[in-house]
Amino acid sequence: MSGQPDPARRIFVSYIDKSRDYYEAQGYGNPYRWAYNTAAPFTPLPKPLADSRVGIVTTASLIDDNDPGPEPFSMPRVVYSAPVDPPPASLYTMHRSWDKEATHTDDLGSFFPLQVMRDFAIEGRIAGVSARFYGVPTQYSQRQTIASDAPEILRLCREDGVDVALLVAL
């Protein structure tokens, strides 16, 4: 091998390192510490994916078309749910922390895989998609997530008969 990258292969990008560097560049004095939960054990699915209803959980927000402000976002940053029919034309992501110079969120399918999940249901890979999708803010501490956000997402998923939650964070 010549030491040059092979254009037929992806070049590995360390999301954790890029995120740590991004937060450091924002002026945070301490290295970013990733949240973790050692008390949550691995739990195998009680039934095959082909028999499971999937719910999508995103950290993006709904867009308020009636908001006259400079940004189309006025919803409080709380857990929410919204119908998948009709699917959202877009979701608001600019208030989230991600490298906006290196990438974009113009393609909804790149971070909100509703159509892929619907295709999987047609193919029989999953039983179906829940009638709603779920949103959760990311500005809170791990304590806030565990104390209120996660239990509310769980309540909504159970209410909708969700067997598997697909977490898609920005």
Image (spheres, rainbow, N blue to C red):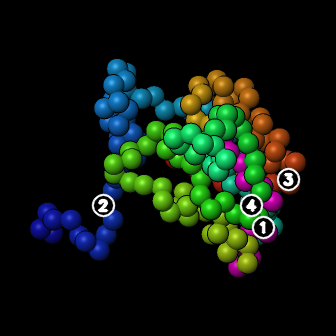
What residue do we see at 78% from left, 42% from top? 154
Q: Position of residue 102 (x, y in %)?
A: 34, 51
Q: Nearer the viewer, residue 26 or 157?
A: 26
Identity of the amino acid at label 3?
A: Asp
- Asked if the residue under mark 1 is in contact with the one under mark 4, i.e. CB atoms within 8 Å, the reply is no
- Magenta span includes 132: yes
Q: Position of residue 32 (x, y in %)?
A: 42, 29
What residue do we see at 35% from left, 30% from top? 26
CA neighbours of label 1 inside 10 A, class few (<14), some (14 to 19), many (20+): many
In the displayed structure, would residue 155 be above or below residue 36? Answer: below
Judging by the rendered image, the residue that carries numbered circle 2 is 11
Judging by the rendered image, the residue that carries numbered circle 1 is 128
Sequence-wise first label, 3 or 1 = 1
Front position among marks 3 and 2: 3
Q: Which mark is residue 84?
A: 4
Is residue 48 something one can see in this rendering? no
Q: Position of residue 152 (x, y in %)?
A: 78, 36
What residue do we see at 70% from left, 63% from top? 87
CA neighbours of label 4 inside 10 A, class few (<14), some (14 to 19), many (20+): some
SS at badge 3:
loop
What residue do we see at 63% from left, 43% from top? 67
What range of the chain is rendered magenta?
A: 123-136
Disc 3/disc 2 C-alpha distance (Å): 39 Å
Disc 2/disc 4 C-alpha distance (Å): 34 Å
Which of the image's four quarters has the N terminus?
Answer: bottom left
Q: Give left or right: position of 111 versus 163.
A: left
Disc 3/disc 4 C-alpha distance (Å): 12 Å
Judging by the rendered image, the residue that carries numbered circle 3 is 160
Disc 1/disc 2 C-alpha distance (Å): 34 Å
Front position among marks 4 and 1: 4
Sequence-wise first label, 1 or 2 = 2
